[in-house]
Amino acid sequence: MVCLTLDYPKYCVTKEIRDMFAKRAVFVAALLFLGWSALARQQSGLSDEAGRVLALENAWNHAIEAKDAKALDMLMAGSMVALESDGSLQSKEQYLAGIKAPDFQPTQAITEQANVQMYGDTAIAVTVFRMKEIEKGKTVTHRERTVDTWVKIDGTWKCVAAVAVSIPSKPQSD
């Protein structure tokens, strides 16, 4: 038995009661943590579906790095269009041909920032995308702001439109 004396009255509890209170405290703490994390996720706007779309954005990056046109093909709707940073408009077939081109040599493709907004079965992913590639024997880094539109078609998310706008490089300070 453990006794606690703070003045009057004297409080005594058995080990079983103390353990029961400790378990309840851990349970309440876990509930508070789960509630807080659910609230934080809700406030961040990242629903389960938005998380899936974000995962597809990352899969797109990995497919670019690996020059995996088949993986990219699976992510895109048949009628997908891409508005490139130079202003050109490409069909899905043209985009995939660019990925397969021998002179396209990516070494890194990552998303620096991402935000996914959900509108029913449509998701808009706004990202900052960075890609390093070898051009004429030199490593070049490109940064783009992208807006990708994803639609859930027959239960599967497909990209229907992709827009990329170049982010100019910051001049080097002397």
Image (cartoon, rainbow, N blue to C red):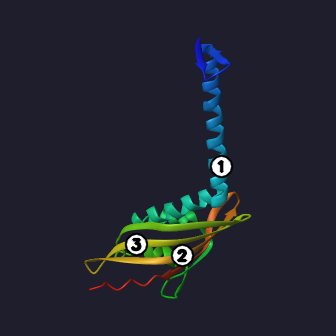
Q: Name the residue under label 1.
A: 38
Give coordinates of residue 16: x percent, y percent: 62, 15
Q: Could you say whether the residue bearing mark 1 is in a helix, strand or loop?
A: helix
Could you tell which of marks 3 and 2 lies nearer the N-terminus?
3
First in residue order: circle 2 vs circle 1: 1
The residue at the far bottom in this view is 87
**3D distance between C-alphas at marks 2 and 1:** 28 Å
Observer-nearest residue: 44 or 46?
A: 44
Q: Which of marks 1 and 3 is nearer the N terminus?
A: 1
Note whether 153 is above or below 1 in the view shown: below
The reply to whether discs 1 and 3 touch (Cβ–Cβ < 8 Å) is: no
Q: Where is residue 64 in the image (x, y as percent from the top left)?
A: 44, 67
Q: Which residue, as the protein is rendered here, is positioned at the far top? A: 1
Query: In the figure, 1 relative to 37: above or below?
Result: above
Query: Label 3: which residue?
Result: 131
Query: Which residue lies under the disc numbered 2?
Result: 146
Q: Nearer the viewer, residue 134 or 114?
A: 114
